[in-house]
Each structure stands twice: as structure tokens, then as C-alpha cells.
Amino acid sequence: MTATPDTVLSAHAREEIDRWLARYPDDQKQSAVLAALREVQHENGGYLTTPLMDAVAAYLEMPAIAVYEVASFYSMFELEPVGRHSVSVCTNVSCMLRGGDDILAHIENRLGIAVGQSTPDGRIYLKLEEECLAACCGAPMMQVDHVYYENLTPARVDEILDGLE
Ligand code: FES
């Protein structure tokens, strides 16, 4: 069977994309690309594949290369399999001055992985360091599955990581 958006994208993904498409003019379908990629990544366990991106491109009537450009530009999209929980430590200036680098080193030691890697059990993905997550007043901070944790200490980090299934 030839792969088409209808065979690659789930019914739920197509419904979700259609919901976003309804917000835009018919000739501006590409406006839904971020929402579409977010949805298919979520359904695919946290990362995008070429067939999924191609299906999104076909569904939105966009060139595939334009979808690849979006997916590779935004840090919220992953192009390889990653752990179930995404951990991003901010090491930009405010967080650095308040110990962000030490927090990151602590996490790497505790998990036995480097930035950009996932734990072998697939539980945690230590995402590339982020450039200021706009929570400087709570430095040092990190984001775990889109939730912000601020004023971190090694003990608090351990508590957060231990709570991830
Ligand atoms: S520098 Fe870390 S949140 Fe701004």
C-alpha cells in the first residue's frame, strides 16, 4: 500500500490538525505546521520520523523540505528516539551565575549520561542546554516535560528526577 497522509497519520492526528486548519484561510494551510508536528510527535513517543514529516507536508500541501526546516529549527522537536521524560537545564547567564552548570553536572553524574543523551532504560532524556527559558528570577532552573522547576538545589533535583516514572 502506498503511504499517504491517511495511512501514516492517525485519525486523531488528522482531527487535531483539522481543528487547527479551521483557524486559517484555505490557502494558508502551512500555518498549522507547528501544531501538526507537535501532535504527531506526541503520538509517536516524543520524536518525528521522515515518513511522519512527509505525511504532514502532504496533508498541509507544503514542500517536505519546508516541514524538515521547521522540525530541525525548533528545539521542541526531536528527530531521533529519546527518553520518555525530557529534562532541559538552563545554563544561560542568570542560571549560570546561580549554579546552573553545577546543576547540569549533578544531573549528568546522577543519570550517567551526557547532555543530548537518554538513559538506557528510556526513562529520561537530557536535552541540549536551553538558552534562557525566561524564568531568570527563579535561577537556577530546569524544564521537565514542559513544567518549570526553579531555585534548584542538587537535593531538589534528585527529588524531581526520582519522581519520574
Ligand atoms: S538564564 Fe536561565 S531562565 Fe533565564
Image (spheres, rainbow, N blue to C red):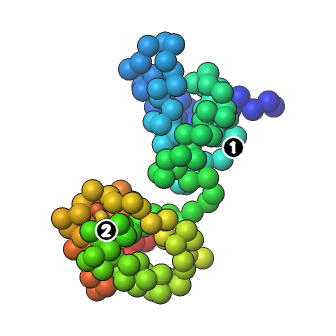
Secondary structure category for the residue under label 2: helix
User: How much space separates mark 2 and mark 1, taking CA atoms?
Assistant: 36 Å
For the residue carrying disc 2, how many other residues have a C-alpha within 10 Å: few (<14), some (14-19), or many (20+)? Answer: some
Between 144 and 28, the one lying in front of the other is 28
The residue located at (35%, 56%) in the rendering is 146
Please tell me in which quadrant of the rendered image residue 139 appears.
Answer: bottom left
Splitting the image into 4 quarters, where does residue 162 fall? bottom left
The quadrant the N terminus occupies is: top right
| Mark 1 residue type | Thr
Q: Decide if ligand 1 comes within 8 Å of the CB at mark 2.
A: yes
Q: Position of residue 137 (x, y in %)?
A: 18, 65
135 in relation to 162, above or below: above
Check residue 98 in the rendering and tell me which mark sits there, or answer none: none
Q: Quadrant of ligand 1?
A: bottom left
Disc 2 target residue: 93
Front-lying residue, 112 or 133: 133
Disc 1 element: helix
Tell me the amino acid under the disc marked 2: Val
Task: Looking at this view, name the residue that lies furthest to the left.
Answer: 137
Q: Is residue 74 visible?
A: yes
- Measured along the vertical axis of the image, is residue 49 above or below residue 54? below
Residue carrying label 1: 50
